[in-house]
Image (cartoon, helix red, strand yellow):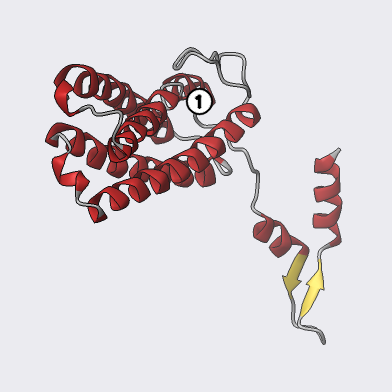
């Protein structure tokens, strides 16, 4: 679904599980792209040795953000795969932890950049500092973008226990094709085929 322009305000109460999954996939993609960009900028600044001059508190928060975004991307990937089988309570708690951690990180980004970063070192005429400013923008935007996951977790709690697939495809095929002591080595269970087609109606 289309997320709100204001971080953390997207309403998921009326959304179905099918509505939520595309947003989780979008977050997975955004996290991967953001992390790749953050790491590329840091590498560039390290190679120019400008990174050493950057306020240490800011370097620390970028390192933390990169680690957190990488972990979150992997968690969301796992959850997406597991939701295709059954919604479980740990999916809710894991997503809520990601959202709450992002909420704290978003606030810390603001504090480090607007309060702690030495003003005399904010040289907007320096192209290297502009890259640091870009790190702040990209890093904080991603943290803010994850705030809606708290609302997703709250809605997902309503689906705990819901099995989104009945039997797996392999289980269905095992019912249809039965191993039997005949010439071909297997037989076809006509009743299973009829049962499967009835279930689709």
- Residue 152 shown left or right of residue 116 in the figure: right
Q: Which residue is mark 1?
A: 156
Q: Quadrant of the N terminus?
A: top right
Residue 62 image offset from top left, x and y in percent: 26, 38
- Residue 196 shown left or right of residue 68 in the figure: right
Q: Could you tell me which residue is drawn at 34 percent across and 44 percent down?
A: 71
Look at the picture and state if 72 lies above or below 121. below
Quadrant position of residue 31: top left
Counting every numbered tag in the picture gives 1
Q: Could you tell me which residue is drawn at 46 percent across and 19 percent down?
A: 151
The front one of 158 and 175 is: 158
Residue 88 image offset from top left, x and y in percent: 46, 35
Look at the picture and state if 145 lies above or below 21. above
Element under disc 1 = helix
Q: Quadrant of the C terminus?
A: top right
Q: Could you tell me which residue is drawn at 17 percent across and 16 percent down?
A: 115
The front one of 31 and 94 is: 31
Quadrant position of residue 130: top left
Q: Could you tell me which residue is drawn at 47 percent across and 44 percent down?
A: 33
The front one of 115 and 61 is: 115
Q: Look at the image and tell me whether residue 180 can be seen.
A: yes
Residue 118 image offset from top left, x and y in percent: 14, 24
The front one of 91 and 167 is: 91
- Residue 170 shown left or right of residue 151 in the figure: right
- Residue 185 shown left or right of residue 162 in the figure: right
């Amino acid at each position: 679904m289309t997320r709100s322009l204001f971080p953390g305000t997207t309403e998921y109460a009326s959304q179905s599980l099918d509505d939520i999954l595309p947003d989780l996939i979008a977050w997975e993609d955004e996290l991967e792209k953001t992390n790749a960009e953050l790491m590329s900028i840091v590498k560039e600044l390290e190679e120019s040795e400008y990174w050493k001059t950057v306020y240490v508190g800011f370097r620390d928060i970028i390192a933390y953000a990169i680690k957190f975004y990488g972990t979150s991307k992997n968690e969301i990937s796992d959850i997406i795969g597991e939701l295709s089988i059954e919604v479980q309570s740990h999916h809710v708690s894991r997503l809520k932890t990601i959202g709450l951690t992002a909420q704290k990180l978003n606030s810390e980004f603001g504090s480090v950049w607007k309060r702690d970063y030495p003003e005399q070192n904010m040289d907007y005429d320096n192209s290297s500092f502009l890259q640091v400013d870009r790190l702040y923008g990209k890093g904080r935007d991603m943290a803010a973008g994850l705030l809606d996951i708290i609302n997703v977790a709250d809605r997902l709690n309503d689906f705990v226990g819901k099995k989104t697939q009945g039997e797996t495809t392999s289980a269905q095929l095992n019912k249809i094709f039965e191993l039997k002591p005949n010439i071909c080595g297997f037989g076809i269970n006509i009743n299973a085929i009829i049962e499967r087609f009835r279930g689709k109606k």
